[in-house]
Amino acid sequence: MSLKSRLVGTAKRQVKQTLRPVLQRAMAPARTQIPAAYWGLESRHGQGLCLEGVPLKELTRRWGSPLHVVHMAALKRNVERFTAVPAGRTAGCEVFYSYKTNPIPGVLGALHGLGVGAEIISAYELWLALKLGVAPERIVYNGPVKSEASVREAISRGIQLLAANHAEELGTFARIAAEVGRKPRVALRVSTDSGWSAQFGTPITGGAALRAYAQARASSHLDVVGLHAHRGALIRTEGELTGFVEAVLAFTDTLYQELGLDLEVLDLGGSLCTPSAEHIDERDWRLNLTFFRDLPAPDPHAALGISRYVALAVELVEAHYARRGRQRPRIFLEPGRAMTGDTQLLLGRVHTLKEGEDRTWAVLDMGVNHAECVRNEYHQLFHVDRPDAPASRVYTVVGPICTPGDTLYHAKRLPDLEVGDTLAIMDAGAYFVPFANSFSYPQPAIIALEDGHERLLRRAETFEDQVALDVPTGEAPASEKPAAA
Amino acid sequence: MSLKSRLVGTAKRQVKQTLRPVLQRAMAPARTQIPAAYWGLESRHGQGLCLEGVPLKELTRRWGSPLHVVHMAALKRNVERFTAVPAGRTAGCEVFYSYKTNPIPGVLGALHGLGVGAEIISAYELWLALKLGVAPERIVYNGPVKSEASVREAISRGIQLLAANHAEELGTFARIAAEVGRKPRVALRVSTDSGWSAQFGTPITGGAALRAYAQARASSHLDVVGLHAHRGALIRTEGELTGFVEAVLAFTDTLYQELGLDLEVLDLGGSLCTPSAEHIDERDWRLNLTFFRDLPAPDPHAALGISRYVALAVELVEAHYARRGRQRPRIFLEPGRAMTGDTQLLLGRVHTLKEGEDRTWAVLDMGVNHAECVRNEYHQLFHVDRPDAPASRVYTVVGPICTPGDTLYHAKRLPDLEVGDTLAIMDAGAYFVPFANSFSYPQPAIIALEDGHERLLRRAETFEDQVALDVPTGEAPASEKPAAA
């Protein structure tokens, strides 16, 4: 490294260090924490953070670390909010949980037990839903990659709704339906101008969606009953929901006027936020990285909650159809993160501390291998052992896998950490488990906490599990081949 | 959505569409492809791309899709280059493969059979190395998170080198060594001013590394024999290697002068690039995203190759020590991506095509779930069925998981695709497998191709495998708990 670039580096470092305390005060966000009580956690003297009376640090002691903890009461509360009939209405929405968001059989089984159906996007998820005993009429099948075998099974079983991701899928559906000799209940995924669409859905704008509906209706093998749409971009406000639903409703008018199609099912998809988690703004992220400015915490009470979301969706759809003198369609919802996001937490321990020039590195036994989402979403972090101690010190909180990308929190003010302390990452119930990998470390166990009792949902991966699919070295004869796939 | 924002959106789209063809021509990169022959692939009439005479599309037919294919001849070639004694020298380097980069037992076993040792970063990897029969003196243990049990085992077995990631680890090593009653051969990871350091290593600058060495040497339980360093940022040029090695060598002088420490082992770590893969530049990425400008392909022959890397490392170290009249230390290398990156390819199929307004979406049966690295690295993509057809059409190549983040190639010019066509993603031998997850789709099989023969290394995950660790729903009694972890 040249003298010049070394000097520039030193100068930069010094400017940062000088500006840091000034900027931290001057630009401090209004909210940098969400209180533990929001999740029903309480701090007990000498026990640290407790959930339903159970000290969280006892859980890692009993079940190992890291550890996922599913809070069953929170899950029930969210289901009740989604499935309740809004005040003043005669019917609410029908709810299908997005399997991909948190595909733990113990969680899915609990949701089904509470009356929630399955929203699936792959042959595996169809297999899992049937294995969990979900009735075919409680299954909605979406996604751009449906294997032919799974479409055949879905049609044979008579699932509730088979949604074509794009027009090109309709031909496959019709062909397989003809072979099976059963008419599937079909929806077409459309995309509005709000949020992303990418490979998903056929755009309303420009007429492609209308043409796809005409094509679908022309097939005698398909029973076109529904419309499917996701907003794509997350819904955090009433305005975002209203704009999206109105765009969809306008298209239902087009379908009625142009094709005489009166939809039986309006599937409004997912996209509702987890109130206490939020995508980190690029500017906030850079200020945190460079000047250790605290990340602003979202205000969960300012976000659109489940009950209001459901009530507003029903209100918009009913009002629209009432004005036209027609009965409103059934409304399907496919919540993912809004259903399970805030019902799970991930516990891990401080493995080692490394003193740096300008911060302390806290190296945990969990990192992006188990908590990929923390890279770009605000997730509240609690010091489980000493939650009430002043958060006086800046830590860079990293994981165990040997890459600088394994950083969970770039600059996080926390109470003093000691090796062995337990930390809790909140809102681990959406996209933590499906995006987890086994990079150099086995995946953690998952337990449920229900009425103060612990129950194992998934055991931790063992070393043996990590090589269970491998052919023992040197033992596979060259001629060994599986049956044609 | 307001009329204004709709108009702005339309205007933006039209500007992009008008500018695209102009910019694509005006700003076309010099190189947009790496020829198939670079990897030993050949195009055969009617068979498409073949490796060692085997048509790749036959492989997915026989073994299923997606499919990882390990090219054993390429692996052997890379090992030979790493382990060869450079011309005019009496000794070369000792090579320890970075397990985390591609932890497939079949690959690791082959490397060990060719004389390569194990560079490990976790208790799991220590377990795996011992299970694969690696002799303790062929194991180097690095990383910030070493469990106490694994440190105890490493010391008891007498592994080649136990590297402290940071000074704080030395106390743990000394305590366990005292308990075990055996002196481990210890190195200390230091960081130079080149590349990233983050949670890794103790900085040379400022004297922290020297103080850590003094601390280590003061312990009667540790045998301080080595120095460990990674450049961090990838090494693609001679200059990058030289700058890094010279910084390390200057510190060996300091150690000798200040502490009288003459190192037995100089562990120069990894960081050498895969010549045919390269991090995508931010600007290139944006031009590709917005204007469909082709991504520039790296010139593999312009990158520092393995043989020259080894020769230069030896030359630098020998010259340095020769000038000081001392014998040069043993040189350890810990290649990861340079060893296996270009020895593996990932095959997948086009599941469906979706016509868009300005491009066609090609939805594959593999996405970021199996090929996370393609998000930010150039990886050559081949049309296996028709490799020689003109690449005339722009595709956005996406995977099967239901998220817009599942995009492998934003705008990729390819020969016309049909449903069922096979594609090959090259250089899948580094960080593809360890970062893979089971998001809605099972993980693919891994086979080896050796002298034209196919051999299964790891079978594909099944649906049953995906829930193998789960407690069957409703069957777990509340009292069931594992032994304390």
Image (cartoon, coloured by chain):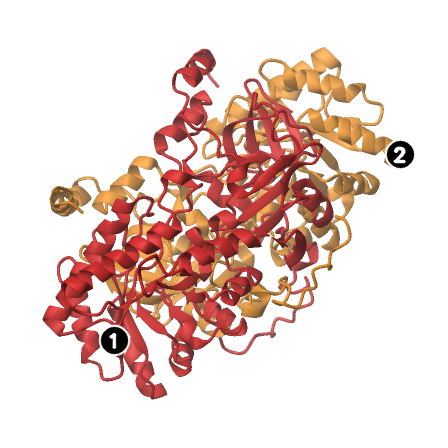
Chain colours: A red, B orange
Q: Which of A446 and A311 is in front in this view?
A: A311
User: The disc numbered 2 marks a residue on which chain?
Assistant: B
Tag 1's secondary structure? strand
Expressed as whole percent of the image width and height from the top left, the position of residue B481 reads 73, 56
Q: Mark 1 — residue?
A: A224
Q: How far apart are marks 2 and 1 (CA)?
A: 75 Å
Q: Which residue lies furthest to the front in this view?
A: A88
Q: Is residue B261 in view? A: no
Q: Which residue is drawn at 64% across and 17% down?
A: B208
- Compared to residue A296, the image places residue A77 above or below, namely below
User: Residue B10's spot in the image, x, y percent?
Assistant: 13, 47
Amino acid type shown at disc 1: Val
Front tag of 2 and 1 = 1
Rendered location of residue A428, percent (x, y)? 52, 47
Residue B96 image point, x, y percent:
65, 42
Mark 2: give few (<14), some (14-19) or many (20+) Cα within 10 Å: few
Q: What element carries label 2?
A: loop
Question: Which label sits on residue B197?
Answer: none
Residue at x-position 41% and y-position 61%? A83
Q: Mark 2 highlights which residue? A: B181
The answer to whether residue B328 is left or right of residue A316 is right
Q: How many marks?
A: 2
- Foreground residue among A113 and A436: A113
* Residue at x 68%, y 48% (from the top left corner): B124
* Res A92 → quadrant: bottom left
Whether residue A56 appears in this view of the structure is yes
Placement of A250 over or under B191, stated as above or below: below
Q: Which amino acid does label 2 sit on?
A: Gly
